[in-house]
């Protein structure tokens, strides 16, 4: 028997071995609709996306989270679409910038 998830419409996709991955810097604006802790749990626990927190500026007012968080993520296009859908569904504004690191030979 499976336990119901708090996000029944979000599906966890298995990372395909042959799917190309891109590196992104993702900034999410917290507007009080989703708690910071729930957001981090959803990204890693529900969507299965590993991330690095680059910066956090969160204030709690009456138990609600306001501010912004910047994450570094390395994901396939399918995982990125799932993340974008989650953010859209929860009315969270986000900005993404493709991270390109120069490699010198």
Image (tube, helix red, strand yellow):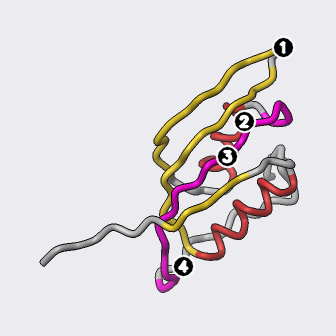
CA distance separating discs 1 and 2: 16 Å
Where is residue 77? Give x, y as percent: 61, 76
Residue drawn 55% across the image and 63% down it: 97
Are the residues flagged by discs 1 and 2 in contact, CB closer than 8 Å? no
First along the sequence among labels 2 and 4: 4
The answer to whether mark 1 and mark 3 are in CB contact below 8 A is: no
Q: Which residue is mark 1?
A: 62
Give the secondary structure at mark 1: loop
Look at mark 3 in the image and give the residue it sits on: 28
Could you give the CA–CA distance between mark 3 and mark 2, rounded to whole angstroms?
Answer: 13 Å
Check disc 4: other Cα within 10 Å, few if <14, some if 14-19, many if 20+. Answer: few
How far from the left and from the top, in percent, is residue 101?
A: 33, 67
Q: Residue at x 64, y 49 (%)?
A: 43
Q: Earlier in the sequence, mark 1 or mark 3?
A: 3
Give the labeled residue for mark 4.
16
- Which callout, 1 or 2, points at the residue further toward the start of the chain? 2
Going from the N terminus, do you reach mark 3 or mark 4 first? 4
Name the secondary structure under disc 4: loop
């Amino acid at each position: 028997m499976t336990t119901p998830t708090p996000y029944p419409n979000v599906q966890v996709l298995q990372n395909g071995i042959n799917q190309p991955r891109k590196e992104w810097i993702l900034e999410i604006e917290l507007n009080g609709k989703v708690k910071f802790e729930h957001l981090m749990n959803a990204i890693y626990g529900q969507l299965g996306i590993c991330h690095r927190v680059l910066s956090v500026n969160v204030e709690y007012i009456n138990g609600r989270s306001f501010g912004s968080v910047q994450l570094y993520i390395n994901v396939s296009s399918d995982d990125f679409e799932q993340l974008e859908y989650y953010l859209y569904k929860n009315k969270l504004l986000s900005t993404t910038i493709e991270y390109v690191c120069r490699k010198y030979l």
